[in-house]
Image (tube, rainbow, N blue to C red):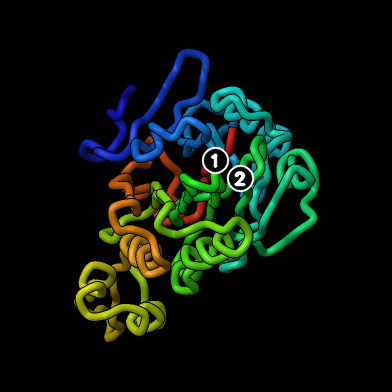
Amino acid sequence: MNINYLTGRSRTTDLISELGRAPYIAFRPFKDIDYITHGFSTRLGGVSRDIYESMNLSFTRGDNTDIVRKNFDIMGLTLGISPGSMVYADQTHTANVLHVDSSHKGMGITRDRSFSDVDGLITDEPGVCLVTGHADCIPLYFVDTKKHAIGLAHAGWKGTAANIAGVVIKKMTEDFGTDPKDLIAFAGPGICRDHYEVGEDVAERFAGMYGDLKMKHILKRMPDRDGEPKYLLNLHMANYYNMVAAGMENLNAYITDICTFCNPQLLFSHRYTKGLRGGMCAFLMLK
């Protein structure tokens, strides 16, 4: 295992790199759950070039489609998951969550989707790999340790403000009988508060959602520039509070200390590159 690329020393994640495979990030809170396969890709180990170098897993940034599919083949080999078993969300910064099964396998990667505007996926069917795309927004992983069901979501500021974490938990409760207290969840690599500047319109969306104590962890006001107030937003903490508010045990809701903006050699960051970038993916599957 190698974490040389990471800022500081992560206590919740490992960067796993094996000979002949692409490096990926795994989460230690899931290490003893032997019935799931999970990971978060890096920008390393693929075949894309130029601004997409090299493990670009986004079909919407302008990279060659065949090359992106080759990258999925490499990640599939790395994780032991066929791309034909993956279901790739169609992310438009919503809080829409879809229950998927084997009939959805391959959608978004090897064949067209039958759905649109979906930022979260859930399943209780083994062999169906949930996939979401990322380049600063937060990947949210959910594992029901009793019902053996899973969920995965993409949480930017809009999805976080719309409480996509709570929507995933509610839908898992409705569809699988999940008790939120049985969930282990992880908010994975994304942009940290130090580098996520937002305007007053975004800050106001969050200000009404949390009490004063929680807001100290979520939003920090910066000195005004040109008469415009600016804020730093902590998406990881906001999603953590959303998980706990949905009924999760606070000790079962984890957040990473890995920032996409702080690790440009390892991870794609939309803000760091000013949009000139590829994309990474989160993967979660029941074996």
Q: Which sits in the foreground, 174 or 105?
A: 174
Picture coordinates of residue 210, whole percent (x, y): 31, 78
Q: Amino acid at mark 1?
A: Phe
Residue shown at the point (54%, 52%) measured from the top left: 151
Residue shown at the point (61%, 54%) measured from the top left: 121
Q: Is residue 172 left or right of residue 110?
A: left
Q: Secondary structure at mark 2?
A: strand
- Quarter occupied by the C terminus: top right
Residue shown at the point (48%, 67%) measured from the top left: 166
The residue pinned by badge 2 equals: 130
Picture coordinates of residue 221, whole percent (x, y): 23, 76
Q: Amino acid at mark 2?
A: Leu
Q: Quadrant of residue 148?
A: top right
- Quarter occupied by the N terminus: top left
Is residue 229 depicted above or below 86 in this figure?
below
Q: Is residue 18 left or right of residue 2?
A: right
The residue pinned by badge 1 equals: 283
Is residue 85 depicted above or below 100 in this figure?
above
Q: Which mark is residue 214?
A: none
Picture coordinates of residue 281, whole percent (x, y): 54, 43
Q: Are marks 2 and 1 in contact (CB under 8 Å)?
A: yes
Picture coordinates of residue 141, whole percent (x, y): 47, 49
* C-alpha gap between disc 2 and disc 1: 6 Å
